[in-house]
Image (cartoon, helix red, strand yellow):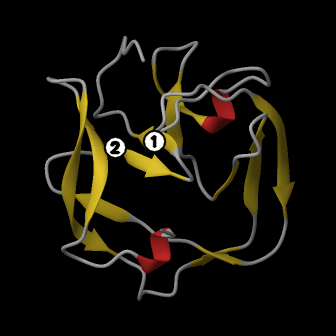
Amino acid sequence: KRIDEIELGEAVLSFDWETMKLIPREVIYTDKDMGKTYTEYDVWTFDDGTVLKTVHPHEFYNVEHGHMTYMSNWTIGDHGYKIDGTRPRLISHDVVKEVVNHYKITLNGSTNFFANGLLNGDRNNPKNINL
C-alpha cells in the first residue's frame, strides 16, 4: 500500500528488535492531508527492480553497515533488506528536479517499517543488526 493511502489506526509490519520478528504496529500519525511538497527527489534503483523515491535524508537498513543508514551514505553495490528476506543490491541513484508530494507516518512503539518492500527506520533503531 502506498504511504499516501495509509490511514490512522491501520497496522503496518515492523521489526520487533527483541524477538527479531515482524509484528503489526498501529499507525498513530500521518501527515498525508498536509499537502507537503518538495522541489526534487532521489530515485534509488535496486537489482531486483525495486525503486525508492525519497525526499530529504531517509535511512534504510544497509546490510554492509548493519544498521539504518542515510541513503546518501550508501555506495552503489550496497544491499538493503526486503520484507521477504532478500537483499537487493543498489545499482543506481538519480536526482529528479520536479515538484513531488511527500508524506510521513509514525507507528506506535516503533520507528521502522517497510517502504516499497525495503526496511527503513531512523537513528532510534539499534546498531549491529544482523539481517
Q: Position of residue 46 (x, y in %)?
A: 75, 37
Q: How many marks?
A: 2
What element does badge 1 sit on? strand
On screen, residue 121 versus residue 47, left or right, reads left
Q: Position of residue 26 (x, y in %)?
A: 18, 62
Residue at 77% across / 45% down in the picture? 49
Q: Where does the image place residue 29, in percent across and percent down from the top left?
A: 25, 70
Judged left or right of residue 39, residue 70 is: left
Q: For label 2, count other residues whose C-alpha is less than 10 Å away and answer few (under 14), some (14-19) or many (20+).
A: many
Which of the two labelled residues, at mark 1 and mark 2, occupies the earlier sequence position?
2
**Could you tell me how far apart the alpha carbons at marks 1 and 2 are, in whole angstroms?**
6 Å
Tell me the amino acid under the disc marked 1: Asn
The residue tagged 1 is 120
Query: What is the residue that sits farthest to the front in this orientation?
Result: 84
Based on the displayed image, in which of its 4 quarters is residue 8 positioned? bottom left
Q: Position of residue 123 (x, y in %)?
A: 36, 33
Residue at the (84%, 67%) spot, across then down: 97
Q: In screen coordinates, is 50 left or right of 121?
A: right
Quadrant position of the C terminus in the picture: top left
Q: Amino acid at mark 2?
A: Asn
Kindly identify the residue that appears in the image at 37 percent across and 74 percent down. 6
- Whether the residues at callouts 1 and 2 have beta carbons within 8 Å, the answer is yes
User: Please, what secondary structure does the residue beneath circle 2 have?
Assistant: loop
Residue identified by numbered label 2: 112
The answer to which of 67 and 25 lies nearer the viewer is 25
